[in-house]
Amino acid sequence: MLSLSLNMGHLIVGLTALFFVLAGYAVLASAVQSHRQGSSLLDVLAQDTHYKYFALFLIPTSAYFVIANWVGWQYYQNS
């Protein structure tokens, strides 16, 4: 019998995957659909042509910024 124990890591990975699926749908799929979704947030994102990509690209851009700053700080400390 399999025993599944969920810890905080599984929760973070699951929520991250859910966020990217929902954000991908909101940004990419809703833009090509011509009918209204019934959700005001999805309708606003579908009609927008610029800022809808901000929510999707904010996380990888922030992660890159944090990693680049950490590496720069390590170079500074060890020089």
Image: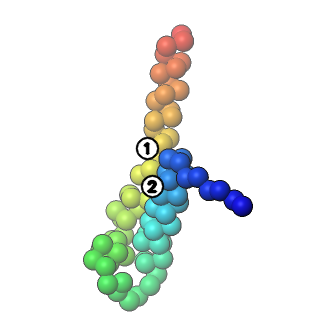
Residue 38, image quadrant: bottom left
- Tell me what residue is drawn at x 42 percent, y 71 percent: 26
- Tell me what residue is drawn at x 49 percent, y 51 percent: 12
Q: How far apart are marks 1 and 2 (CA)?
A: 8 Å
Q: Which amino acid does label 2 sit on?
A: Phe
Q: Which amino acid does label 1 sit on?
A: Ser
Q: Nearer the viewer, residue 16 or 55?
A: 16
Dot 2 falls on a residue whose secondary structure is: helix
Which residue is most to the top?
79
Which residue is most to the right?
1
The residue beneath circle 1 is 62
Q: Dot 1: few (<14), some (14–19), or many (≥20) neighbours within 10 Å? A: few
Sooner in the amino-acid sequence: mark 1 or mark 2: 2
User: Can residue 20 be seen in this snapshot?
Assistant: no
Q: Residue 33: percent from the left, percent from the top?
A: 44, 84
Q: Locate the N terminus and report the quarter of the image it occupies.
A: bottom right
Residue 34, image quadrant: bottom left
Q: Residue 20: percent from the left, percent from the top?
A: 49, 62
Q: How many marks?
A: 2
The residue beneath circle 2 is 57
Q: Locate the C terminus and report the quarter of the image it occupies.
A: top right
Which residue is most to the bottom?
35
Q: Is residue 6 left or right of residue 32?
A: right
